């Protein structure tokens, strides 16, 4: 093979340019270390922000409604029920319910500890709850995979200080599997502040905390059949008919204000589509992903530039030798292959060093709590990428070398 | 001589335009990436109150016990019981209690709808302790705290929104349907990171609370805190109502004390130990005394005031600059070693090595400066897109000021000089006779 035959003379030539060779090797290694970690960060963030909430995000919106003056629980509950009746009656609205939080909010959901046994002394399993009613599943657009929906008569009024002890709850499949890994969870009784029967299991529903932080309980969600009559305020989740969200939003706020002006709805942040919520909820992830892409591209360009620069320099330095080889019968293809093999060897050495550096850098960042562990194939993909980049970068200088006429051997520069 | 070397450098750059452009671009991009990350990190990691940061402390008392606290540390916030005890003990030069809560502001004009507004319940020392500037009026005194007087301090922004740009002190502000007398209007107050209530919000760059009312008054109105933490597995009796909440071991109050020197800080630490020992004796804490007095810097670190992303990007940018530098070393090596003939002639004509070194360093500095100028331009350009990468609240605060510009230039020149050291040394090794014979 033509390439293989040239390795010996290439190594001999490189030995005469130890410094420059070492620098390119080092540069390729450093680039690989940074780029593979950056690609890994990009991968984790993209995977994170692509997670579905499980809801009909395209048609959902939320109204964060505050109450003016501190009413007692019964009065707040009456106002909430009147509001919900109004919202559900609007032409563009498909369904609505009241809760204390909404998906991708980044907080707000009530964390609950769930025990399998009331006498359990180990830490209860943590989950995030939504207060819900019989309209919640239809509003969110989540699919029931087992059991049944809440019934209207199950929905109780609850206050901010009341115990969370509903007779029935609906949980996500994710939580069901964690609570009962070996047997079906439907129909089982678990313990929050009191015993609750699992009457339904939904396919997927993210808790309100899911967002730019990574938690293992993002899909461990409990629906609690209650209206939280919190004097401080409530959240209305509303699902519009397909394509009617914008008009339904305007109509909803107008209808609520027309019904009762003694309420607080922030004109800016009080009414949000779930699309907007997703945007802000994952802003950090998107930002980091963008930064990683920009830096990786710059870094690869810089390395490619360095390879072009040094290769060109070497070509210009060796014009006479190239001419001599051509005069002695080497074809253009031979010269091209020479420089490409040289580049392959240099980048290969850099890549090997780089894989080690990349893994080292990842371990160091892991120790500082900045990154999880990177699977080694990220570094290998990075190595392949750099090797390709090297071959592309060297193509120009190598073509110029191949174009050197045999007569250059006897012509002074 | 410098002038002559500059001329030589310019001539050399003209001769190899592509190589020069490559080095300038590498330096420009490398330095710009670092400056941008630094600009953001500078905002995120800034000292919110430089004049006093060494004097401000957060007292912590472990009322959860080792079975329920986090990693053996006392909770970040105080329970009502402990907060009141520390406030009334008055063992610090100043002490204040803070909790964030939301108000409903009802404008005097019946045409404009009421709107929600983030505010804070604080005690009298708050304003002096945190160097809060007043445009009009002032805060309130201890008597107002004790008497639960309905007074309020509002920010300049809220004042403009409600009253226009006038002195509104003495006028009435309606919050949640209750009337408060405006005691003061704040001047330019915007500490970043927002350290005062960071234990409640865990967000150093959120919106500034616009309304401040006496702590005891807010309690009387049963204004709920934005966040509270009642250790989930605690065996404490169940909280059934507002008074039960106050009596509970739930933590929700941000306590701050001002201690002017090390001696008073040590004294306060002893006081905390004594207080917890007393509580232990009373049977409230059935575990070893566990108190902590954190200073402001520590509080910011513990609450991750500097977002993870900005630190990560600083590391990555630094990695990028290093790769650029290694690249530049290689390119300069190529560039300088091509000039053997020129060096040989100069050496043969009597130039000492020192002069060769000087000549090449001048050339490197010139290229570095060009890279720096490009770096400043790229930084300015990058500022426009910062909010796509970093938290917008922080990104919009990053500024390209004279300091940052000179830093960029200086870093580019210094880095290029550093990169040029070795290539220059190699160039200076050229032996005149050998090189001339070769040529």
Image (cartoon, coloured by chain):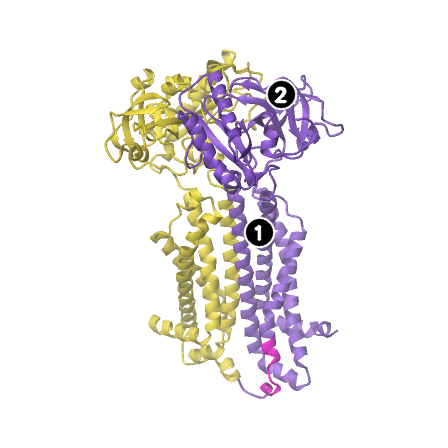
Mark number, residue A38: 1
Mark number, residue A84: none
Q: Residue at left 43%, top 42%?
A: B393
Residue linked to disc 2:
A192
The chain letter of the purple chain reads A
- Whether pointer 2 and pointer 1 mark residues with C-beta atoms closer than 8 Å, the reply is no
Q: Mark 1 lies on which chain?
A: A
The chain letter of the yellow chain reads B
Q: Residue furthest top?
A: B282
Q: Residue at left 42%, top 52%?
A: B384
Q: Residue at left 48%, top 34%?
A: B303
Which region is colored magenta? A399-409
Image quarter of the N terminus of chain B:
bottom left
Point out residue A102 in the picture as x, y percentages from the top left corner: 54, 32
Task: Choose between B389 and A137: the one closer to the eye.
Answer: A137
**Residue A264 within the magenta-colored segment of the rendering:** no
Tell me if residue B173 can be seen: yes
Circle 2 SS class: loop
Q: Is residue A410 above or below residue B201?
A: below
Q: How crowded is mark 1: few (under 14 residues within 10 Å), some or many (20 or more)?
A: many
Point out residue A119 in the picture as x, y percentages from the top left corner: 67, 17
Q: Is the magenta stretch mostly helix, strand or loop?
A: helix
* Residue B137 figure quarter: top left
Q: Mark 2 lies on which chain?
A: A
Point out residue A393 in the picture as x, y percentages from the top left corner: 59, 68
Q: How far apart are marks 2 and 1 (CA)?
A: 42 Å
Task: Choose between A381 and B420: the one closer to the eye.
Answer: A381
Tell me if residue A123 can be seen: no
């Amino acid at each position: 093979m033509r390439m293989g035959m040239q390795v010996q003379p290439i190594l001999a030539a490189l030995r005469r340019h130890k410094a420059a060779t070492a620098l390119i090797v080092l540069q390729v290694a450093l680039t690989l270390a940074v780029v593979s970690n950056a690609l890994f960060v990009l991968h984790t963030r993209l995977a994170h922000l692509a997670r579905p909430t499980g809801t009909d995000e395209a048609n959902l919106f939320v109204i964060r409604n505050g109450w003016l003056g501190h009413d007692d629980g019964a009065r707040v509950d009456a106002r909430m029920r009147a509001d919900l009746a109004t919202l559900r009656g609007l032409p563009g609205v498909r369904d609505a319910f009241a809760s204390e939080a909404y998906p991708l909010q980044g907080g707000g959901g009530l964390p609950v500890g769930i025990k399998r046994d009331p006498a359990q002394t180990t830490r209860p399993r943590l989950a995030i709850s939504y207060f819900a009613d019989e309209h919640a599943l239809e509003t969110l657009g989540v699919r029931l995979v087992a059991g049944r929906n809440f019934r209207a008569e199950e929905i109780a009024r609850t206050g901010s200080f009341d115990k969370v002890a509903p007779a029935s709850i609906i949980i996500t499949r994710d939580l069901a599997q964690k609570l009962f890994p070996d047997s079906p969870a439907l129909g089982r009784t678990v313990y929050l502040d009191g015993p609750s029967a699992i009457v339904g299991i939904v396919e997927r529903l993210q808790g309100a905390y899911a967002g730019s932080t990574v938690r293992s309980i993002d899909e461990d969600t409990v629906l609690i059949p209650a209206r939280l009559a919190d004097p401080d305020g409530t959240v209305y989740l509303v699902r519009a008919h397909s394509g009617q969200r914008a008009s339904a939003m305007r109509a909803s706020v107008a209808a609520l204000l027309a019904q009762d002006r003694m309420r607080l709805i922030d004109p800016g942040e009080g009414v949000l589509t779930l699309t907007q919520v997703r945007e802000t909820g994952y802003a950090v992830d998107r930002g980091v992903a963008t930064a990683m892409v920009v830096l990786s591209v710059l870094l690869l360009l810089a390395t490619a530039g360095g390879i072009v620069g040094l290769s060109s320099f070497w070509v210009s330095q060796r014009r006479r030798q190239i001419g001599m080889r051509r005069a002695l019968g080497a074809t253009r293809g031979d010269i091209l292959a020479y420089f490409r093999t040289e580049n392959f060897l240099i980048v290969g050495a850099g890549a090997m060093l780089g894989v080690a550096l990349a893994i080292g850098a990842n371990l160091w960042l892991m120790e500082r709590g900045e990154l999880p562990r990177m699977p080694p194939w990220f570094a290998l993909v990075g190595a392949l990428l750099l090797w390709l980049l090297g071959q592309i970068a060297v193509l120009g200088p190598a073509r110029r070398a191949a174009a050197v006429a045999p007569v250059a051997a006897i012509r002074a520069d | 001589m410098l002038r002559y070397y500059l001329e030589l450098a310019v001539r050399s750059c003209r001769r190899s335009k592509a190589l020069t452009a490559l080095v300038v671009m590498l330096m420009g991009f490398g330095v710009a990436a670092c400056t941008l990350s630094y600009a953001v990190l500078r905002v995120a990691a800034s000292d919110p109150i430089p004049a006093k940061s060494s004097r401000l402390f957060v007292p912590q008392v472990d009322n959860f016990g080792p079975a329920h606290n986090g990693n053996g540390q006392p909770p970040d916030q105080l329970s009502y019981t402990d907060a009141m005890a520390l406030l009334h003990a008055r063992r610090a030069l100043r002490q204040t209690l803070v909790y964030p809560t939301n108000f409903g502001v009802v404008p005097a004009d019946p045409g404009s709808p009421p709107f929600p507004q983030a505010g804070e319940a604080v005690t009298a020392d708050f304003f002096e302790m945190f160097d809060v500037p007043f445009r009009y009026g002032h805060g309130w005194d201890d008597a107002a705290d004790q008497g639960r007087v309905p007074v309020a301090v509002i920010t300049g922004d809220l004042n403009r929104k409600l009253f226009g740009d006038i002195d509104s002190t003495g006028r009435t502000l309606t919050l949640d349907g209750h009337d408060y007398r405006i005691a003061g209007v704040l001047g330019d107050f915007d500490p970043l990171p927002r350290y005062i209530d960071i234990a409640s919000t865990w967000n150093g760059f959120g919106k500034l609370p616009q309304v401040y009312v006496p702590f005891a008054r807010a309690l009387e109105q049963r204004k709920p805190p934005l966040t509270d933490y009642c250790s989930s597995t605690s065996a404490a009796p169940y909280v059934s109502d507002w008074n039960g909440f106050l009596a509970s071991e739930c933590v929700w109050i941000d306590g701050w004390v001002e201690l002017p020197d090390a001696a008073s800080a040590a004294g306060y630490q002893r006081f905390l130990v004594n207080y917890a020992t007393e509580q232990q004796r009373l049977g409230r804490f059935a575990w070893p005394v566990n108190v902590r007095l954190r200073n402001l810097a520590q509080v910011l670190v513990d609450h991750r005031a500097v977002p993870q992303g900005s630190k990560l990007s600083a590391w990555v940018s630094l990695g990028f600059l290093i790769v650029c530098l290694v690249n530049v070393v290689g390119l300069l090596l190529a560039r300088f070693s091509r000039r053997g003939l020129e060096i040989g002639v100069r050496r043969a004509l009597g130039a000492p090595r020192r002069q060769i070194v000087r000549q090449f360093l001048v050339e490197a500095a010139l290229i570095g400066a060009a890279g720096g100028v490009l770096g400043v331009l790229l930084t300015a350009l990058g500022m426009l897109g910062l909010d796509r990468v970093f938290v917008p609240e922080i990104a919009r605060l990053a500024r390209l000021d004279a300091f940052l510009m000179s830093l960029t230039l200086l870093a580019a020149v210094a880095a290029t000089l550093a990169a040029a050291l070795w290539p220059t040394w190699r160039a200076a090794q050229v032996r005149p006779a050998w090189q001339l014979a070769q040529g």
